Image (cartoon, coloured by chain):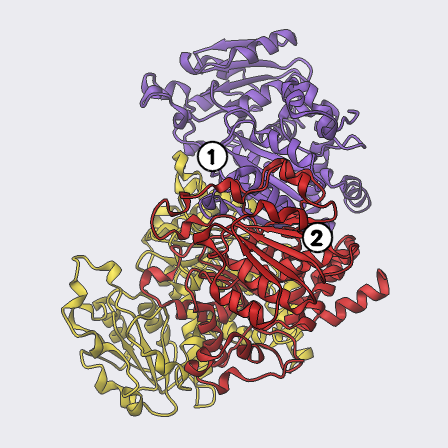
Chain colours: A red, B purple, C yellow
Amino acid sequence: MLRRKRLDEISWEDFNRLSLEEKAPYLVQANGRPYHVLIAQQFNREQLDGLCDLATRIRRIAKSKEGMRFLSDLLCHKRAMLDFTQPSSRTFLSFYAACQILGIRPAEVRDPSISSEMKGESREDSVRTFSSYFDMIIMRTPLQGFVEKMVWELSNTDRPLPIINAGSGKDQHPTQALLDIYTLQRSFEKNGELANKHIVFCGDLARGRTVRSLSRLLTYYPNIRQTFAAPEHLKIGQDIIDDLAAHNVDFTVTTDFKSTIPTADAIYMTRIQDEWDKTAGESSHFNLMDFALTVDDMKQLPHTSVIMHPLPRRHEIDPAIDSDPRAVYWRQMRNGMWVRSALIATIFGRDQEITHYYMMNLK
Amino acid sequence: MLRRKRLDEISWEDFNRLSLEEKAPYLVQANGRPYHVLIAQQFNREQLDGLCDLATRIRRIAKSKEGMRFLSDLLCHKRAMLDFTQPSSRTFLSFYAACQILGIRPAEVRDPSISSEMKGESREDSVRTFSSYFDMIIMRTPLQGFVEKMVWELSNTDRPLPIINAGSGKDQHPTQALLDIYTLQRSFEKNGELANKHIVFCGDLARGRTVRSLSRLLTYYPNIRQTFAAPEHLKIGQDIIDDLAAHNVDFTVTTDFKSTIPTADAIYMTRIQDEWDKTAGESSHFNLMDFALTVDDMKQLPHTSVIMHPLPRRHEIDPAIDSDPRAVYWRQMRNGMWVRSALIATIFGRDQEITHYYMMNLK
Amino acid sequence: MLRRKRLDEISWEDFNRLSLEEKAPYLVQANGRPYHVLIAQQFNREQLDGLCDLATRIRRIAKSKEGMRFLSDLLCHKRAMLDFTQPSSRTFLSFYAACQILGIRPAEVRDPSISSEMKGESREDSVRTFSSYFDMIIMRTPLQGFVEKMVWELSNTDRPLPIINAGSGKDQHPTQALLDIYTLQRSFEKNGELANKHIVFCGDLARGRTVRSLSRLLTYYPNIRQTFAAPEHLKIGQDIIDDLAAHNVDFTVTTDFKSTIPTADAIYMTRIQDEWDKTAGESSHFNLMDFALTVDDMKQLPHTSVIMHPLPRRHEIDPAIDSDPRAVYWRQMRNGMWVRSALIATIFGRDQEITHYYMMNLK
């Protein structure tokens, strides 16, 4: 269990200077449960296992009306603010649904132009405003480092409250990494477990934040082989490579995606994110279809393997593949709702109550 | 009772080719209740009567706090997505309120620009996303045929769910037709019933989808005379005329609206929808006031008649008429909330529970 | 207690012609409770005291889950429409949260472009639409006098409902005045009471509607000295000065803000609202920092004094002051949620139930 350190006993400069791993103890509660959610690396294996187990329990409890009634009573006294100044359908809606499942009353800001910022208010003051009316802030922002700053700032007011990073800048999207881990665990339940597997990442590995986070979390699981298949100019960052090497992970970097298919246990496809292109058309100098999955490719893929994708997709997966049982990306998306529910319930200390209900009623 | 046919046993091409009437069996549940709501013509007389009765029961139950408590518990375990990429105040808010009345937790998309579509996602994938987090989709779209396509597509996934068409393109707005029928029934309760009446439609009959749907449903009721009063270039479509003739309905097409007033039991006013004009100013070549209702006109209208309007209005009804007891358009609008509540309750199989509560407590 | 006069027994012209004080009886219920909330001056001292007491009770009840459960059951059968066609984060969110606290199901319009007004509907018809689906309208609008007009109009339909003015044009923002009074009362609880105090207003006193309302309400409290410190061209309106003189209030008008600090019991800072500038740059002809509060200034301010601000702020308060215990503006903002909850509960007649619960459980 992580031993808590206090954010009101460290300066912003000192906190900001810490490594991702060193920040972890500042983000937990006295009982070791997560409080703020900032970076994928803050979770250790024990926490991941706990969240995955809880997500499954919530998912099963939610199947009945009585179960839904139990869940929606758990946090009916709480209100959450979804502060999404960077657009996102999927992350927004799954957090929104997660709040509704737990009975939390949600409010939202999705368009920064409809707000007091027109009157010259600082973003810091806007977020502090939300903290006054709500019990939790779920925040998505294009500003790198901003969520972290607000976590520190609000912890130094007389009204601290938990903040969940729902995607910040190009760097972090920790709850996406959680749902990816949960999906891998569920996918391999009947086929061993999340160990001794070959995971292939494909697409825009330089700019996709989900792969960076997931790759790091996979080092917690024994004997995972990681392959990174990307066009030369979009290959995985050197920092990730160095990190994997330091952890003695078996990994490969390649530009030949198609050759990796026959040995993959999971293929994690990603979209070429040309919205981050530095020069227009930068992403059109290579053949997109070399990093796409076609119906034909599926013949090469083992029957027990799975295909994942954080979505939205464009051309990298043919929609005809959707009906193949190995295509788990729609279920993966839905898993986001369950694992986010589990996370919020844990932050507010309702995990044991859920587990108890599950044991008494569904075991 | 309609016998259900299965959407996962017919190809999209074959389904798309069916007549409106032939589609009806594909939209019901095994027990004959509606499941998807796509077109006004899918309802038969028996279903219309059931929905109108249920709407009245819900309306009366909702008058007390205990009644509201009963209603809001019925579907408190469900979440609905209101996907309104075409703007609409009235339809949106009445569906929203209907969800709230039944305890359904609503989420909304009202501005397509705040969404992942910016990242190049297909509309189909967006809707499938909604299906992952919610239990029902209520959809308004400018794309003709799109709701129908999604109904078929989601029925062929492992996560089908009911979809309600809240207005699609120029062609269909089935719940508007439901509330119109309900309003006519209520209006004639004390004055006979919805039979042997003269209904006058006035305004933009070429482009208004509500008149087209309502006209068709009125053929279910005995001896209804229909008059269509419109400027020449906005007159009712030939397909409607052919259809009425085929059903032996007594109907008249005219450009002289004012002369129809003294014999009308109901006047259904509509707005000149110049947003659909093919050339700018197309709708300014005739005298708008010839198709408007003034305080003076009211002297010609029988005391037991009613004036309806789907709203919003512009100049076609003088606001001074609002306080006349024959003006039922505001009540008509409110009826939309009740009949939509009845529809949703029926789709989720709660109609008998409501009727039972009504019989025990309010009869 | 105010004796109620009926809005459906007076013409719009006659009502509109009344003084602010004369309008008050038209805004209450038969039992003297507020019904519509239009102007700060409609509240008398008795009503203010009642609302402040109730706000404190709600605030304390809300601390426990059982308390929140009690509160959120009070109005769970009601739905409210937040019609915010003028942007506002703070007022919107605190009303939204207040509705959630009391169990009211909220719906919102925040962007007038996503609405039927595109189709040429009048604002009056739009508001009447809201009245059809909801039990209360909370309205913010840039149109001066519009809320008042709708209050009169809806009172003359067969479906009247309470309307709360959440800020209209440049003139009125009555619930801001309520939260300001509540904050002053709370601030002086341990330091005497809201009497015999020196209140300094600073900033844009010509255009800020909050100061105008608050100044007027302060005349209800004994021996309050008021100082108005503003640049020459932004000084407090002559109508306020005349009014204070007529009430024999001890007041000062000055351009020297800094000299007022050592004797102030409360400093009420306001933002220079250059969005109302008639000519660009009008507000840049004086030194903004003469009407700002710095860390240095705090040394001059008595230890028992408080600093208020309606927020949002720009440069007029240094964020370094936020952590000073005399800075109560964040708490002031949060008070808005409590006093708005108290107001809504009172309008719907739940005040005694709340007081009873408080006496039984928390006294």
Q: Residue drawn at (63%, 82%), measured in percent from left and top?
A: A30
For residue B39, which quarter of the picture?
A: top right
Residue placed at 31% from the left, 64% from the top?
Answer: A120
Q: Amino acid at mark 1?
A: Asp
Horizontally, residue A300 falls left or right of residue C18, namely: right
- Identified by mark 2, the residue type is Cys
Count of picture labels: 2
Q: Position of residue A219 (x, y in %)?
A: 63, 67
Q: Is residue C203 above or below residue A275?
A: below
Residue C43 visible in the snapshot: no
Helix, strand or loop status at disc 1: helix
Picture residue at 50% right of the left edge, 14% below the top = B236
Query: Which comes before the other along the chain, label 1 or label 2?
Result: 2
Nearest the eye: C56 or A184 = A184
Q: Which of these two is toward me, C176 or A127?
A: A127
Compared with B52, C192 (above or below) is below
Task: Tell me the residue that label 1 is attached to.
Answer: B322
Label 2 crowding class (10 Å Cα cut-off): few <14, some 14-19, many 20+? many
Depth check: give the residue in front, B48 or C192: B48
Residue lying furthest left in this view? C285
Chain of the residue under label 2: B
Do the residues indicated by labels 1 and 2 lie within the same chain of the protein?
Answer: yes
Label 1: chain letter? B
Q: Secondary structure at mark 2?
A: loop
Question: Residue B189 appears at what percent x and percent y?
Answer: 67, 28
